[in-house]
Image (spheres, rainbow, N blue to C red):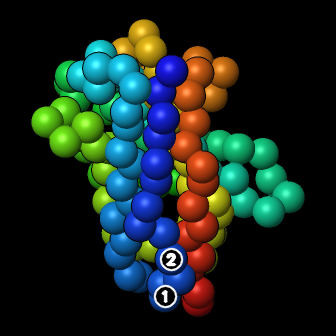
Amino acid sequence: QVQLVASGGGLVQAGDSLRLSCVASGRPFYVLGLGWFRQAPGKEREFVSSISWNGGSTVYADSVKGRFTISRDNAKNTLYLQMNSLKPEDTAVYYCAADPWGLGKTDPVEYDYWGQGIQVTVSS
């Protein structure tokens, strides 16, 4: 089992920045692939970004490429998502997720463990 606890959400204005964090416990952190997903009201959950077990591979959705940066600190068992130049369309509940195979894929079905979801609201 892997427990994931996310933090860092909030209400910001367009153009502002936020950093989301997700602390994992229960299994060796360094073997996990990790990802961020989001779900806006009335929409399906969508992929935002992922990172492989060693940080060597990162993937971004086109909608966030160049604005968001995913990273991980294996010494702190923590995943991050730095979000810059936020837009109102980034408003959603954000979820961190863990892939026990370490690859950090884009399909949510590849992830076995999910955090509790945190609200990010960007006002125009």
Indicate the position of residue 58 as horizontal and vertical percent values. Answer: 32, 32
Q: Which mark is residue 32?
A: none
* Residue at (39% x, 48% y) in the render: 22
Is residue 123 something that shows in the picture? yes
Q: Secondary structure at mark 1?
A: strand
* Residue at (32% x, 59% y) in the render: 82
Task: Give the left or right position of residue 90, taking residue 104 as reference.
Answer: right
Give the Cα distance between marks 2 and 1.
10 Å
Vertical placement of residue 124 versus 30, above or below:
below
Q: Quadrant of the C terminus?
A: bottom right
Vertical placement of residue 63 versus 83, above or below:
above
Task: Give the left or right position of residue 1, taking residue 22 as reference.
Answer: right
Is residue 87 something that shows in the picture? no
Query: Quarter of the image holding residue 92?
Result: bottom right
Task: Give the left or right position of residue 97, taking residue 56 as reference.
Answer: right
Q: Looking at this rendering, what residue extends furthest in the left direction?
A: 75
Which residue bears the numbered disc 2? Answer: 10
Q: Nearer the viewer, residue 49 or 19?
A: 19
The kind of residue tagged 1 is Gln
